[in-house]
Image: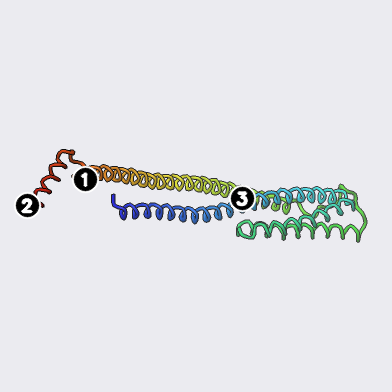
Amino acid sequence: MQPSILSSRVTGGFAALLLVLVIAFVASVHGAARLADLETAVTRARDVLEEIGATRVILREAEHARRGYLLTRENEFLQLYLAAMKNTVAHLDRLRGLTADDPGQRRRVAAIGPLAARQLTLVTDAALSVSEGTRVPAAAAPLSDDGTIASEIRGLVAELEDGERARLREREADANARTVTVIRGFGVVALVALLLLGATYYVLDRDATVRAAVLEELHIATHVTTPAEHSQPPETARARTTGDKHTRSD
């Protein structure tokens, strides 16, 4: 094997290995960035579900306070209702910010606000009518609404939760698939790198063996081609010396 051929093969092997490593680095950076985005999306979906749960709880408290007030006209229930509605507005604001990237969810959150405001108006109107007139017995007190608004709000909250759970499952599936892809990609890159290293080592080892064999042949050839006078018997050397003397005397 000629040195130039060997050098080109070794250089090509190392160049291919370097190219594979560069591609692996770029792919790993891209995969890690995509995986980080998916993990962020999963975290956001979980935050939305947690906020929806908190909103449902505060809406349930508001509904209980509303019913209590409309049945008893006690100021204590009214205060509880007003405090719950204030907390509801805060939760809806947070939900609006968390669902800003999802038009469907943002539309549902936006629909809850007017319903809650309408319900609040009905309750406050009932409170004003009581404060301006004479307190009537609880059994004869008219209801401000029949619970339709509360039912619509519960339906929207349920739609919010169902949509977000579906979105969470989808994002978790995408994140798991991306993780598997990244792991497999690293495995393939590692295998290719090992194969290239093995091929490079084989070429270098073969070159060393060939060089050793060539040096051995050169060493043997040097001993075989020693000058004839050093390798001929003493009698032949003396005869040649005597013939040279007779030639000079003639």
Measured from the top left, where is residue 189 in percent x and y?
Answer: 45, 48
Q: Is residue 132 left or right of residue 161?
A: right
Name the residue located 75 percent from the left edge and 48 percent from the top edge. Answer: 57
Q: Is residue 135 left or right of residue 88?
A: right
Dot 2 amino acid type = Asp
Please give the residue where the numbered disc 2 appears in the rendered image.
Answer: 250
Near-viewer residue (1 or 229): 229
Q: Nearer the viewer, mark 3 or mark 1?
A: 1
Q: Mark 1 or 2 closer to N-term?
A: 1
What is the CA distance from the residue labelled 1 to the residue labelled 2? 34 Å
Badge 2 crowding class, 10 Å Cα cut-off, few under 14, some 14 to 19, many 20 or more, is few
Measured from the top left, where is residue 28 in percent x and y?
Answer: 51, 53
Please give the residue where the numbered disc 3 appears in the rendered image.
Answer: 42
Please give the residue where the numbered disc 1 appears in the rendered image.
Answer: 225
Badge 3 crowding class, 10 Å Cα cut-off, few under 14, some 14 to 19, many 20 or more, is many
Q: Secondary structure at mark 3?
A: helix
Badge 1 crowding class, 10 Å Cα cut-off, few under 14, some 14 to 19, many 20 or more, is few
Q: Is residue 19 left or right of residue 104?
A: left
Q: Secondary structure at mark 1?
A: loop
Measured from the top left, where is residue 25 in percent x and y?
Answer: 50, 54
